[in-house]
Amino acid sequence: MAQAAPSDQHSVGLVTAESADFSGPFPLASGESLPAYTLVYECYGALNADRSNALLICHALSGHHHAAGYYDLEDPKPGWWDTAIGPGKAIDTNRFFVVALNNLGGCHGSTGPTSTNPATGRPYGPDFPTVTVPDWVNAQAALADRLGIERWAAVVGGSLGGMQALQWALSYPDRVGATVAIASTPRLSAQNIAFNEIARQAITADPDFREGRYLEAGVVPTAGLRLARMLGHVTYQSDDGLREKFGRAVRTGDLDILQDVQFQVESYLQYQGKSFSRRFDANTYLLMTRALDYFDPARAFGDDLVATFAAMKAKLLFISFTTDWRFPSARSREMALAALRAGREVSYVDVDAAQGHDAFLLPVPRYLEVLGTYLRGLELRP
Amino acid sequence: MTLRPDLKLIAAMVPEGARVLDLGCGDGALLAWLAEHRGVRGYGIEIDEDQITRCIARGVSVLERDIDEGLSDFPTDGFDVVVMAETLQAVRKPGTVLEHMLRIAPRSIVTFPNFGHWRCRLELASAGRMPIARHLPHAWHDTPNIHLCTFADFEALCAERSLTIYDRKVVNANYQSTWAMNHWPNLFGTIAVYGLSRPGA
C-alpha cells in the first residue's frame, strides 16, 4: 500500500486510510455502551508470516490515524509522527508492521461525537458516552483481532498515547511484548487537571457551543477551541523553548509608542489556535481531556503503582524530556522505579531536550536513537 | 563474550540467580554476562548517555539517573547484591552510598583504585604533584574522581560505619595478584574488590 516517494527513501511514501466496522454493543467503563462503531486506521510495512512483527501506535490528545507518509504527491505535510516512523527510522517499517488508528470518540473518521447517533438520526454531540483509556484499548484490541494480530511486538505512544501503551500491558498482559511510554504519566496531577478544566471552560463558555449541539445549529465554537488550544500549547512548550524560538521579538507595531504591538509568540499561538479550531471537534476535545483526567490505573490496585506493574508481563521503556513540565521526568522516573520494584524488565532514559512536552513529536537525536535501539533489540516471537 | 578482568573478579562473587543492582553499570557488560551465565536478573544505573544506549542495545535493563541524587527510593532488601565498580571514588558522599547499598541488599561488591599505591606515594613525595597512573589517568582538575582514597582509608570508613568486610581481592593494573600485594596490599595493590555485608553480619 505504501509506495515510497522517490525523493525520500526513509518515508513510507503514499498511504491510504482504511476503516473497520464493528457491530456492538460495545460496553464502556462508564456502564454505557455503543451500539456499533467504526475505527479508521493506517498500516505501514508488512505483517510477517508468523504475525510477530506488529507494532501499535497510540495517539495523544490531538492525534489520529495518519501517523506517517503522505496522502498524495501534493500533500504538504506528512503524518504526525513521520519523524519516527518509516524505513530505517526509529520505528522501522522494514522490520515492523505498524498500525495507527484514530481512537473512539475522535473526530478524524472513527465513531465520535460528530458521528450520527443511530438512536436519533442526529449527531451524537454531547450525548456521546464518556470513554476512557481502557475503553480505547478494548477497541484497539478489537481492531487487532480484525487484523489477525494476536500479540503486539510493541505498543508505543507519547503522552496520552503512552497511557494507552501502559493500559495495554495491564488489560491484555499476554498480547504485548514491549510497552514504550514516552513523556507520559501514571496519573494527572492537580495542576494538569486544572489546565484541562480551563480549556474545557473556554470551550463550553463559547456562545457557539450551544451545550454541545453546535453541529445541528450549523455553528462551531471556534473561539473556545482556539483558547483551549492556545492554553494547551503553552503547556506543551518549555520556557526555554519559547524563549529560543520567539524571545521578545515583535511582529507588528511599535514598542516605543506602545501601539498595536503584537509579539511573535502571540501571533504564533493565535495561528496554532486558529488552525486547530478548523480541524478539531469541540466535543472530542472535551472527551479526550476527560479521558486524560480519569486515567489512573493504580487506583484499582489500592494506589499501589508497584502492584500495578506486577500485573503486567510486558517489558517496558520509559522516555522523558528534561524540560517537560506537563508530564515531567519525575513521573517517568517514578514509573520506572515502580516497574523495577515489580520485577519487570525496564529501562528509563531522560533526554536532555529544550522543547518541553512536545519533544516527543520532534526529531530529537538522542531520543530517536534510544527508541530505535530499543525496538531493534526486541525479539519477535508469535 | 569475554568479560573485562575486573568485572570477572566481581562476577565470581555473585551467586547464581541473584537479583543484582549495578550502580554505574557502564555499558552493561557485567549485567549482560551475569544474565547469560548466572541466570541473574539485573538492573543498571548509569548517567552517561552513550553507555545507556549500549546497555539498551544489549538488552540490559538500565535506568538513567545520578547516584548523587540519592538512592532512598530504592527498596530495602529489594536486591541480593549491589555492585559498584570503579564508581565509589566519583560519588559525592561515598559513606552514605555504601550505607544505602547495604540497605538495598545484604551484600555489596565495591571496587576502586588505590591512592596508597607506592607509585602514587612516590610521585607525591618526590615530585610534589598529584599522581597520574594507569589506574588513575586523570589530571587533578579534570577528573571524575573527587574522593580518591587508599585501601586503608576505605577499611577505616567501613570500621567506622560498622560495615563488615567479608572478602577482599587486591590486584595490580593487569588484575593479577602477587606475593607482595598479598602482604602489603595498601602499598602494592592498585585495585581492590571488596565484598561487604551489614553490621554484625
Image: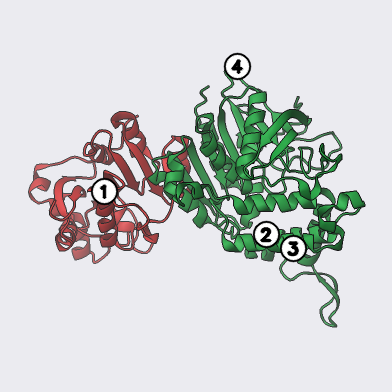
Chain colours: A green, B red
Disc 4 on helix, strand or loop?
A: loop
- Specify the quadrant of the image occupied by residue A249: bottom right
Spatial distance from mark 4 to mark 3, Cα to Cα? 50 Å
Q: Are marks 1 and 2 on the same chain?
A: no
Give how far across and how far down residue A85 sits, in percent.
66, 36
Q: Are marks 2 and 3 on the same chain?
A: yes
Q: Are marks 4 and 3 on the same chain?
A: yes
The three-letter code of the residue at mark 3 reads Gln
**What residue sits right under mark 4 in the picture?**
A49
Q: Is residue A365 left or right of residue B88?
A: right
**What residue sits right under mark 3 in the picture?**
A201
Spatial distance from mark 1 to mark 4, Cα to Cα? 45 Å
Label 2 crowd bin: few (<14), some (14–19), many (20+), radius 10 Å: many
Q: Front-most of B113 and A345?
A: A345
Spatial distance from mark 3 to mark 1, Cα to Cα? 51 Å
Q: Are marks 1 and 4 on the same chain?
A: no
